[in-house]
Amino acid sequence: AQSVTQLDSQVPVFEEAPVELRCNYSSSVSVYLFWYVQYPNQGLQLLLKYLSGSTLVKGINGFEAEFNKSQTSFHLRKPSVHISDTAEYFCAVSAHNNAGNMLTFGGGTRLMVKP
Amino acid sequence: DAGITQSPRHKVTETGTPVTLRCHQTENHRYMYWYRQDPGHGLRLIHYSYGVKDTDKGEVSDGYSVSRSKTEDFLLTLESATSSQTSVYFCAISESPGLAEETQYFGPGTRLLVL
């Protein structure tokens, strides 16, 4: 079984400042890692995912994440945030079973960008 | 955007009444999922389907049933709604053959309030 911990439930930050949203996972098998974003009153959309290869993954809207196998982490970063980045961010892991990919989500981190 | 609709988008019901939520997709994807979203818990899988008439339980399936008679429709039923089932419900889809690295695409959500 897999589990995901997002260490911060809320992250306030000023516009144009850098931000890091932390995600740690545990699993007994190899996993794939995802970050999803949920804007207010909307569904989730994929921000980026790590499957294999380079541990630095670039996503949409200037976000990137780094996979660290030894620390079982997949932290999300952006060098300069905008007001429009205000949203809830979910880290998730998946592992294949015999019926399809099963996503396990963290509890979410609410990013609040202030002017 | 993936063609996923959910209906209704909002519902208020009373304890003990049956409720059915519908997810409709136009992508012809094989895999469909129902999640519930609650503060601090992220999204948790209720049930999923890997084909017509093929369904299985997720992490929080007690009190819920599902049916899939057509590729495009996945129904979630609360047989006798309880206040603990007040939540936001999301449908998701992923393409065949449902590999673990595949992205799941989410619908807009249904906000359910059980009084």
Image: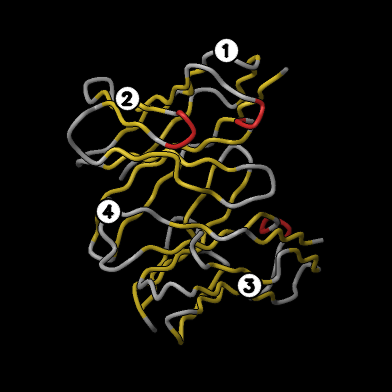
Whole-number angstrom distance, CA of label 1 to CA of label 2: 19 Å
At x 37%, y 68%, the residue is B31
What residue did someone put label 4 on? B100
The front one of A46 and B70 is A46
Tell me the residue that label 3 is attached to: B21
At a point 28% along the width and 66% down the height, the residue shown is A99
Q: Chain of mark 1?
A: A
The disc label shown at residue B3, or none: none
Q: CA distance from mark 1 to mark 3?
A: 41 Å
Tell me what residue is drawn at x 64 percent, y 32 percent: A84
Q: Which residue is mark 2?
A: A66
Dot 1: element: loop
Whole-number angstrom distance, CA of label 4 to CA of label 2: 19 Å
Q: Where does the N terminus of chain A fall, quadrant-wise?
A: top left
**Mark number, residue A17:** 1
Amino acid type shown at disc 2 = Glu
